[in-house]
Image (cartoon, rainbow, N blue to C red):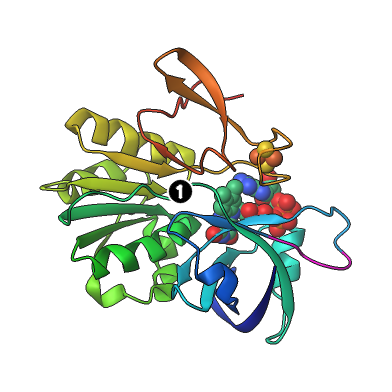
Amino acid sequence: MMARLVRSCQITARDTLYEFDCPELAGKARPGQFVEVALGEGDSSFLRRPISVFDCDGESRFSLLVRTVGRGTQRMTGWEPGREVDVLGPLGNGFRWPERAGVCVLVGGGIGLAPLTYLARRLLAEGWKVRLLFSPRREDELLNALPQREELEIRCAENRAHLPEVLEELLANADCVFACGPEGMLETVARTTMERGIPCQLSMERHMACGIGICLGCAIAVHTPEGLTYKKVCKDGPVFRAEEVSFHEQP
Ligand SMILES: Cc1cc2nc3c(=O)[nH]c(=O)nc-3n(C[C@H](O)[C@H](O)[C@H](O)COP(=O)(O)OP(=O)(O)OC[C@H]3O[C@@H](n4cnc5c(N)ncnc54)[C@H](O)[C@@H]3O)c2cc1C
Ligand code: FES
């Protein structure tokens, strides 16, 4: 489907927020889902790029927060408002919805903040108290992209070594945890929450080609009652329960 770029806004030197008009997608997207963005003419790889739904009004508009890391994301920075962009989605399973409103902790590592923002919007709307742990502090300019910044209790960890201490504090009375970011950080969050019996969901990343379960390029090792197996991050994920992910036996 085609999405019209309404505006783009540079949040940090390497992170840009793109807002699109596309009722077809905005009406369906759930927190934790992603889109596959086509870069258009001149992209010799032909591959779409997977990007999380950063925010969505549920009716006509959705936005993406994109870090410039390579050729594809660099090309996006040249997009002007009015451009029609070919997007596939919403894709993936998204976050499973917790049952009753309480206290939840979101943990975002760098650009891993992206899938947590729409989630925060929906949780706040349902009466949840939302705590956000962001790391590392030196990237906290990224928090300027958050539309609901004032409504969240935000704490920053200086780095990965400082994360367990801050996480420990935020987990007091927490009913559930959602996290996205570097895998080392996710492993710490998974271990800590499992030790305390707090349900935790992780949004995982893999290099993707098709994005729809055909190419098998995005395999992730997961524990099942039958033993270790592989799932597809694009179709079975990107969100997994913390206890499912096998951090040390990846393909
Ligand atoms: C489900 C999912 C959701 C994502 N959501 C976002 C988002 O909201 N915002 C955002 O900025 N990025 C997101 N990403 C990562 C994003 O897809 C890549 O950064 C992007 O495809 C890089 O394209 P490129 O052509 O600029 O870089 P390339 O030239 O392809 O690569 C540049 C560098 O980035 C690394 N890289 C490329 N793709 C990935 C990937 N999928 N995972 C890890 N490293 C990668 C490469 O190894 C290389 O080092 C997401 C990825 C997945 C799988
Ligand atoms: S990206 Fe092709 S199967 Fe997941």
Whether residue 230 sits left or right of residue 42 in the image: it is left
Q: Name the residue that disc number 1 marks.
A: 181
Residue 24's x, y, as percent? 58, 71
Residue 234's x, y, as percent? 59, 43
Residue 190's x, y, as percent? 33, 35
Q: Which residues are magenta?
A: 37-42
Residue at 43% of width from left, 49% of height from top? 180
Q: Quadrant of the N terminus?
A: bottom right
Q: Which residue occupies the foreground of this view, 250 or 92?
A: 92
Whether residue 119 sits left or right of residue 227 in the image: it is left
**Quarter where residue 66 is shown:** bottom right
**Quarter where residue 213 is shown:** top right
Could you tell me if residue 81 is visible in this image? yes
Q: Which residue occupies the foreground of this view, 91 or 42?
A: 91
Whether residue 209 sits left or right of residue 122 in the image: it is right
**Amino acid marked by disc 1:** Gly
On screen, 169 above or below 241?
Answer: below
Q: Quadrant of the C terminus?
A: top right
Residue 229's x, y, as percent? 53, 19
Task: Name, please, the residue furthest toward the left.
Answer: 173
On screen, 72 above or below 240?
Answer: below
Residue at 17% of width from left, 57% of height from top? 101
Helix, strand or loop for the magenta stretch, by majority: loop
